[in-house]
Image (cartoon, rainbow, N blue to C red):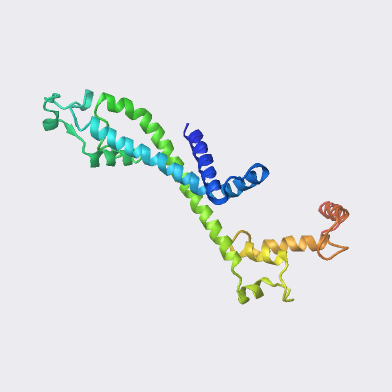
């Protein structure tokens, strides 16, 4: 249920953002705009909705238990001896708004100290579905927060990749010809952001160069097949020199 509402809310937020940035755009352009908006705001939309759902559970628990169990005699094993509805506020269990907020936080985060618990039949009946859905909302909130932080880190990497100083340019220019190829630029960004190490990339370049015969920067399907045949022969023990 939470996931269904989340998807509905995210679609609504994307429509609002689409109207705010581009106005009413029909057809294929609208679809492309929606994809752009989803890429740009998707993580924030998920975090926004997850925050709303989590705070909603927190607020409900605080208000409900502070109101319903402000004065309670409890029942069963936790019943307060000599307590009646008339003197519950004097000798019974009491919950202030701060107590109810504390209990809600401890419950939804699954810490569960146990010092404050639902103390009425109605509180326990309502508390069961509230706890179950609340724990799910907390997990959803934490997941959305982590995803948003990862997205922010990714955007920061992209911003860093757009800033190229003279020193950075020379570091990218591996052959020193004063020009950057696409491969050199991608190679530098991958290594700089620890997506892959330089040794692994050099290994890939070495394999490419061994396959490349006709042109310096491209290979044909025939060259790939020939290289695969060569590898097969070497792995069968005929030639392991290279």
Q: Is residue 140 left or right of residue 234?
A: left
Q: Nearer the viewer, residue 49 or 173?
A: 49
Residue 188 visible to the viewer: yes
On the image, the x and y values in percent for residue 162 come to 60, 65
- At a point 11% along the width and 32% down the height, the residue shown is 90
Residue 29: image location, x then y, percent: 66, 46
User: In this image, 18 relative to 242: left or right?
Assistant: left
Left or right: where does residue 11 sit relative to residue 131? right
- Can the viewer see residue 241? no
Q: Is 134 placed above or below 210 here?
A: above
Q: Nearer the viewer, residue 12 or 155?
A: 12
> In the image, is residue 154 above or below residue 76?
below
Percent across and percent down for residue 32 are: 64, 47
Q: Residue at x 49, y 49 (%)?
A: 44
Q: Give the vertical position of 89 relative to 205 (above or below).
A: above
Q: Position of residue 50 (x, y in %)?
A: 44, 42
Residue 161: quadrant of the picture: bottom right
Q: Residue at x 67, y 63 (%)?
A: 186
**To which quarter of the image does residue 137 belong?**
top left
């Amino acid at each position: 249920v939470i996931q269904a509402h989340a998807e509905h809310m995210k679609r609504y937020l994307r429509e609002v953002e689409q109207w705010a940035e581009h106005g009413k755009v029909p057809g294929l352009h609208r679809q492309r705009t929606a994809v752009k908006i989803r890429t740009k705001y998707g993580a924030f939309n998920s975090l926004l909705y997850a925050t709303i759902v989590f705070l909603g559970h927190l607020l409900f628990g605080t208000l409900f238990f502070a109101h319903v169990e402000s004065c309670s005699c409890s029942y069963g094993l936790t019943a307060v001896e000599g307590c009646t509805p008339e003197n519950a506020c004097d000798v019974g269990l009491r919950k202030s708004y701060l107590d109810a907020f504390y209990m809600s936080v401890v419950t939804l985060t699954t810490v569960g100290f146990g010092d404050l618990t639902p103390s009425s039949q109605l509180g326990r009946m309502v508390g069961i579905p509230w706890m179950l859905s609340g724990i799910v909302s907390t997990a959803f909130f934490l997941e959305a927060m982590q995803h948003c932080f990862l997205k922010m880190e990714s955007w920061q990497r992209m911003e860093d990749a757009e800033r190229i100083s003279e020193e950075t340019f020379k570091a990218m220019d591996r052959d020193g010809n004063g020009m950057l190829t696409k491969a050199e630029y991608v190679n530098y960004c991958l290594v700089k952001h620890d997506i892959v190490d330089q040794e692994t990339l050099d290994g890939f370049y070495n394999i490419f160069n061994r396959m490349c015969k006709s042109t310096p920067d491209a290979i044909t399907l025939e060259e790939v097949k020939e290289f695969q045949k060569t590898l097969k022969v070497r792995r069968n023990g005929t030639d392991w020199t290279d």
